[in-house]
Image: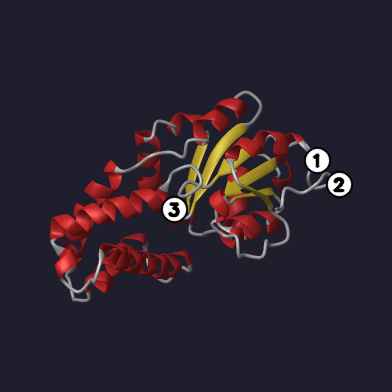
Amino acid sequence: MDIRAVVWDVDDTLFDYTSADREGMRAHLVAEGLLLAGHGSVEEALARWREITDQQWARFAAGEVDFETQRRDRTRVFLGRELTDAEADAWFDRYLVHYESAWSLFPDVLPVLDALAESHRHAVLSNSSLHVQDRKLRVLGVHDRFEAVLCAAELGVSKPEPAAFLAACEALALPPRHVAYVGDHPEIDGRGAAEAGLLSVWIDRADAHATVEPPVGPRRIASLSELPSLLRADTRFGAPSTFR
């Protein structure tokens, strides 16, 4: 199998979103004095924020609300009170200052991008918005590594729908059989890419999904350092799987 390009997810694949979100929200809660307003502890508040984020993001991914609305609703639900759009935006913008100060790539990202720079083309497919991810990639210093950056908000279709993955292949002018997709979610990224006909690679750092039954199709790796050898292997036609 001749894999000529790699399409990448961003959050929790290249960019350590979970750590940045936790650290950003922790600092924001302190600055806003919210630990004294209905949250028993920092960890309780952080867990509640992540739960609400996942719920509202699922609504956005399903096309029920737009990108700005899911942000505002995250804020309203978390604070438990009615806010105007301007008030919700202002609160979220203050959080973003702390969140962005904690941005970082995973340590295995630059080495693998360097290792594959000459052998493979690269693009991004994210379920976020181009405004957010384009800026993020620039701040992190890797934007120029990618030929194309595609996001659900502008595409009008999101992962795991095959059309999202096929749009990335089209942007590269390559058929799916020549493209690998790397993402952190076993279903949205892993199964979705496999069902669209791409070589699907599921990055599961530190067994974050250790209790998840691996879906049929994606190859499961624990570090991006495993990716170059996997791309050289004929994994879809007889070579050993990397499932653990």
Q: Which residue is mark 2?
A: 238
Q: What's the amino acid at mark 2? A: Gly
Taking 232 as reference, is 194 above or below it? below
- Circle 3/circle 1 CB separation < 8 Å: no
- Residue lying at the far bottom in this picture: please name it: 81
Whether residue 241 is visible here, answered yes or no, is yes
Whether residue 129 is visible here, answered yes or no, is no
Name which of mark 3 and mark 1 comes first in the sequence: 3
- Circle 1/circle 2 CB separation < 8 Å: yes
The percent coordinates of residue 108 (x first, y second) are 52, 35
The percent coordinates of residue 107 (x first, y second) are 48, 35
Q: What's the amino acid at mark 3? A: Glu
Q: Residue at x 68, y 62 (%)?
A: 215
Q: Which residue is mark 1?
A: 234
The alpha-carbon separation of the residues under discs 3 and 2 comes to 38 Å
The percent coordinates of residue 167 (x first, y second) are 58, 49
In the structure shown, which secondary structural element does the residue marked by tag 1 occupy?
loop
In the structure shown, which secondary structural element does the residue marked by tag 3 occupy?
helix
Front label number (3 vs 1): 1
Front label number (3 vs 2): 2
Q: Residue at x 75, y 34 (%)?
A: 232
In the structure shown, which secondary structural element does the residue marked by tag 2 occupy?
loop
Quadrant of the rendering where the N terminus is positioned: top right
Taking 112 as reference, is 234 above or below it? below
Identify which residue, 66 or 187, lies in the foreground: 187
Q: Residues within 10 Å of mark 1 (few under 14, many from 20)?
A: some
In the drawing, does residue 111 fall left or right of residue 215? left
Identify which residue, 16 or 4, lies in the foreground: 16
Q: Which residue is mark 3?
A: 154
- Circle 3/circle 2 CB separation < 8 Å: no
The alpha-carbon separation of the residues under discs 3 and 1 comes to 34 Å
